[in-house]
């Protein structure tokens, strides 16, 4: 019972500011546990993901890729937006990952719910998804 309480405490509550606001994803906080393709800070910036076909085709591919990843739950899906929760293997820390699918590229944001540093996990995740998306036909 104590272990279950500890694990649920590691997940934290989802932030209430996620989603698209005025055509943009929520900015990263000042802590180094978030990356975004819309960040102006070089330390937090990642490149947007490329489209693979049309925006709708790219979204379908992203949904498929997310379904194939371990410990991922697709939380929200609309015409141009996806939000997923990624859980770490051991302590089940949760990271929120968002995709804003545009006409030219896919803006992304990946942020840890808890803690200060993520030891580069969010950046590695986005680069892993970029590689997997690039492998799709």
Image (spheres, rainbow, N blue to C red):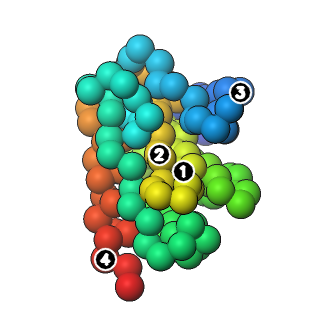
Q: Residue at x 43, y 21 (%)?
A: 115
> Residue 7 appears at what percent x and percent y?
55, 36
Reading the image, the residue beneath label 2 is 108
Q: Is residue 20 visible?
A: yes
**Which secondary structure, mark 2?**
strand
Reading the image, the residue beneath label 1 is 99
- Which quarter of the image is occupied by the N terminus? top right
The mark that comes first in sequence, 1 or 3, is: 3
Vertical placement of residue 123 versus 34, above or below: below
Reading the image, the residue beneath label 4 is 135
The mark that comes first in sequence, 4 or 3, is: 3
- Which quarter of the image is occupied by the C terminus? bottom left
Are discs 1 and 2 less than 8 Å apart at CB?
Answer: yes
Residue 76 horizontal side relative to residue 100, left or right: right
Q: Which of 120/30 is in front?
A: 30
Residue 37 found in image quarter: top left
The mark that comes first in sequence, 1 or 4, is: 1
Q: Residue at x 26, y 32 (%)?
A: 119
**Which secondary structure, mark 1?**
strand
How far apart, in angstroms, are the residues tagged by discs 1 and 2? 5 Å
How far apart, in angstroms, are the residues tagged by discs 4 and 3? 34 Å
Label 2: few (<14), some (14–19) or many (≥20) C-alpha neighbours in 10 Å: many
Residue 70 horizontal side relative to residue 130, left or right: right
Reading the image, the residue beneath label 3 is 16
How far apart, in angstroms, are the residues tagged by discs 1 and 4? 18 Å
């Amino acid at each position: 019972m104590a272990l279950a309480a500890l694990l649920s405490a590691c997940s934290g509550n989802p932030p209430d500011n996620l989603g698209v606001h005025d055509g943009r994803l929520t900015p990263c906080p000042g802590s180094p546990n978030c990356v975004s393709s819309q960040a102006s800070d070089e330390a937090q910036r990642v490149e947007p993901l490329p489209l693979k076909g049309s925006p709708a085709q790219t979204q379908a591919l992203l949904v498929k890729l997310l379904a194939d990843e371990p410990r991922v739950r697709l939380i929200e899906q609309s015409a141009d937006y996806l939000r997923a929760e990624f859980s770490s293997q051991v302590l089940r820390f949760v990271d929120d990952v968002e995709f804003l699918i545009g006409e030219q590229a896919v803006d992304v944001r990946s942020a840890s719910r808890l803690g200060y540093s993520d030891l580069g996990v969010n950046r590695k995740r986005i680069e892993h998804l970029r590689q997997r998306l690039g492998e799709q036909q």
